[in-house]
Structure formats: structure tokens, C-alpha cells
Image (spheres, helix red, strand yellow):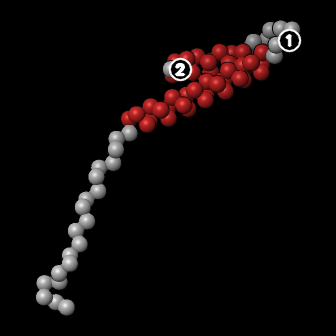
Amino acid sequence: MGIGWCIGLLAVGGILTFAVDWHMAGVNLDLVGLILMAVGIIGIAAYVSIFKRRRMQPPPPAAPVIEETHRHGYE
């Protein structure tokens, strides 16, 4: 599901919840709107997390650790 569909679900859900005065037998349009908005928010969160993971670059390799085994004549 793309970001456009998620924003569309948010918009349709908001319209159904806050702007519609229709009454349908057996259907609560406020609840349907809230469900659509929740699905839109979850879709946006999933899309952003996947997009962020794709754009992350691997960390640079760590510098090699050099251990001195000799103290140049000092003991």
C-alpha cells in the first residue's frame, strides 16, 4: 500500500467521521471512519519504517585494533 492510499484512507475516514450526517440502518459511519483512519495511520507508519530501513546505510567498518606487545626495552 503506497503513501497515497494511506493518506486517502485518512481523508475518507475523517470525512465519514466528522463531516457526514447520514444515517444508515445497521452501519455506524463514525466507527467506519475511525477504522479507516486507524488503517491509514498504521499504513503510513509501516511505509515510513520500510522506507527508512531501505535508505539506511551500513555503518563504516571499525578501525583495526593494534595492540603493542613490546615496550621497546622498558620492562
- For the point 17% across and 83% down, the residue is 71
Residue pictured at 24% horizontal, 61% vertical: 64
Question: Can residue 36 be seen in the rendering of this structure?
Answer: yes
Residue at the limit of the structure toward the left, as seen here = 73
- Occupied quadrant, residue 32: top right
Q: Image quadrant for the C terminus? A: bottom left
In terms of depth relative to the viewer, which is nearer, 23 or 55? 55
Secondary structure found at label 2: loop
Q: Residue furthest right?
A: 25
User: Is residue 25 toward the left or the right of residue 29 in the image?
Assistant: right
Picture quadrant of residue 16: top right
User: Which amino acid does the dot numbered 1 rest on?
Assistant: Gly
Residue 28: x, y in percent?
A: 81, 16
Describe residue 14's horizontal placement relative to residue 71 as left or right.
right
In-image side of 13 versus 23 (left or right):
left
Is the residue 36 above or below the residue 57 in the image?
A: above
Read off the residue under disc 2: 1
Q: Quadrant of residue 69?
A: bottom left
Asked which secondary structure carries label 1, the reply is loop
- Per the image, the residue denoted by label 1 is 26
Query: What residue appears at the point 38 percent right and 39 percent down from the top-left corner?
Result: 56
Q: Which of marks 1 and 2 precedes in the sequence?
A: 2
